[in-house]
Amino acid sequence: MAGGGFAVDGPVTGINNGKITLSVVITCIVAASCGLIFGYDIGISGGVTTMVPFLHKFFPSVLRKASQTKPNIYCVYDSQLLTSFTSSLYLAGLAASLVASRLAKIIGRRNIMLLGGSTFLVGSALNGGAVNVAMLILGRILLGFGVGFTNQSAPIYLSEVAPPKWRGAFSTGFQFFIGIGVLAANCINYATAKQEHGWRISLGLAIVPAAIMTFGALFITDSPSSLVQRNKFEQAKKALINIRGKDTDIEPELALLIKNSEIAKAIDEEPFMTIFQRQYRPQLVIGMIAIPFFQQVTGINIIAFYAPVLFQSVGFGNDSALIAAIILGMVNIVSILVSTYTVDRYGRRFLFMEGGIQMFITQVGVAIVLAITTGTDGTKHISKGYAILVLVLMCLYAAGFGWSWGPLSWLIPSEIFPMKIRSTGQSMGLAMNFATTFVLSQTFLSMLCHFKYGTFLFYGAWIFAMTIFVALFLPETKGIPLDSVHTVWEKHWYWRRFVQSSIPEDTINHEY
Ligand code: BGC
């Protein structure tokens, strides 16, 4: 089949596959807006950590280093304390994501989103009013709990609620809102950077996206799947009628949800153990380990962090550094929309591979330009022309990420696990994503300081590896209802050896 997939375009289970109602659109926009808080935090923490009054108050050693004559552009921000400020969020997020899957069984996905939004709100207030590093880090830990909860529940919610045929498109909404959050934060940083207490405004304003998403979540119902799991069958039926439309026969979908939920309950296993059974090896390797890990070793956060620093250090000043970040943010958002349009038409594999090749070429390009212009010790000035070339390369890189590893890393783990281990699988995948982000943010500043432009080659090599991985091991899931996704493993040239087949052997057309 073209594109190497074996998408099933028609409904496989008698479920209405493609109808889009206004209600499902609104519900999914609200759920996707959970991405706002994560994005806002990413954007704000990157910008605030380059603001002089902020550094002066909390991290004066960074400023002392920057004022040395002839600073090395790769090493200015190499401070352990600054690193722990940025990365404390990810450890808290990791813990929260694991708790979230258990809690979801009791209180449902919608309430987990509410909990995440509220915790984030409190953390934002603490950060905005911080008087010492301890308060700052405590606030960040609460923000981490917040995004741990919302990043666990929102992507699954979207996959469960979206019409199967357009699941990919709906799911990209989460990354879209992350992008909006990043961009809004960059603009706010731009406006506050010169004010003495600008950092307080930047950090404190995080309550706005938190309030928006928490308020929105009050008005949506839980996903039908989550309601069925909690034996709320009548509510599940109402929720299905609401999102699929009054004139749609929702009975087949409801019956399938109930059947799967009963199977899951009858087995009564510990989901954190079930996931390690041989039959779930494909989901374990792809959804829990490879995709979340690879997303981070694309180096996206390093590029996002390094762009302002680079442009500042070549003499563009604080303003231009933030403008460069804003340009990158806008490119990113537009490219996510490209993904929204294409993901259910051309499939996940096509986007992953195109994006991967583009990101590989541009990462290597950035490394080459930096090697030629800044010299091995990183002290030479880059001319404006070369700085613009680096910006262009970074924009192409951000576009590649925006239509591949950005949105798809949330989509794939939310759609490949069967119902009984979906929450647990998504949690563990998210924990992997946070753990990798934590390790990278702990090491990246000193890595940049020691390996210099070689850092970009390091990520380039990972991008190469992950693109090959996708080509060989990721089956196409476009258009397949969640409850039939297991069939893709049965047809896959490698994964079929791990799963029990429900498809007659002679009808299988082995493909990727
Ligand atoms: C990633 C973040 C990244 C963001 C960039 C998200 O999908 O998980 O690590 O900073 O995209 O927009």
Image (tube, helix red, strand yellow):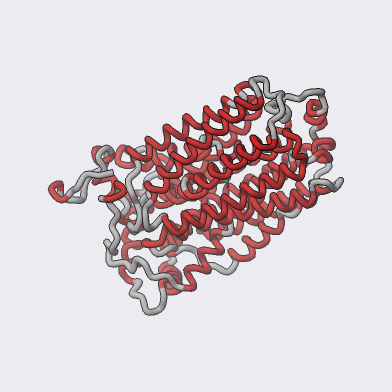
Does residue 91 appear in this view? no
Residue at point 60%, 66% (across, down): 218
Q: Foreground residue, 217 or 359?
A: 359
Ligand 1, by image quadrant, is: top right
Q: Which residue lies furthest to the left in this view?
A: 506
Q: Residue furthest front?
A: 385
Query: In the displayed structure, does residue 406 sit left or right of residue 390?
Result: left
Say which quarter of the image contains residue 132: top right
Q: In this view, does 392 lie above or below 155?
A: above
Q: Foreground residue, 407 or 287?
A: 407
Give residue 15's position: percent from left, percent from top: 31, 66
Residue at point 19%, 51% (across, down): 503
Residue at point 82%, 38% (across, down): 52
Query: In the displayed structure, does residue 51 sit left or right of residue 303?
Result: right
Query: In the displayed structure, does residue 256 sit left or right of residue 272?
Result: left
Query: In the displayed structure, does residue 451 sit left or right of residue 237?
Result: right
Q: Foreground residue, 172 or 254?
A: 172
**Number of labelled discs?**
0
Say which quarter of the image contains residue 12: bottom left
Residue at point 37%, 35% (across, down): 468
Q: Is residue 173 above or below residue 18?
A: above
Tell me the quarter of the image containing the C terminus: top left
Give residue 63's position: percent from left, percent from top: 81, 31
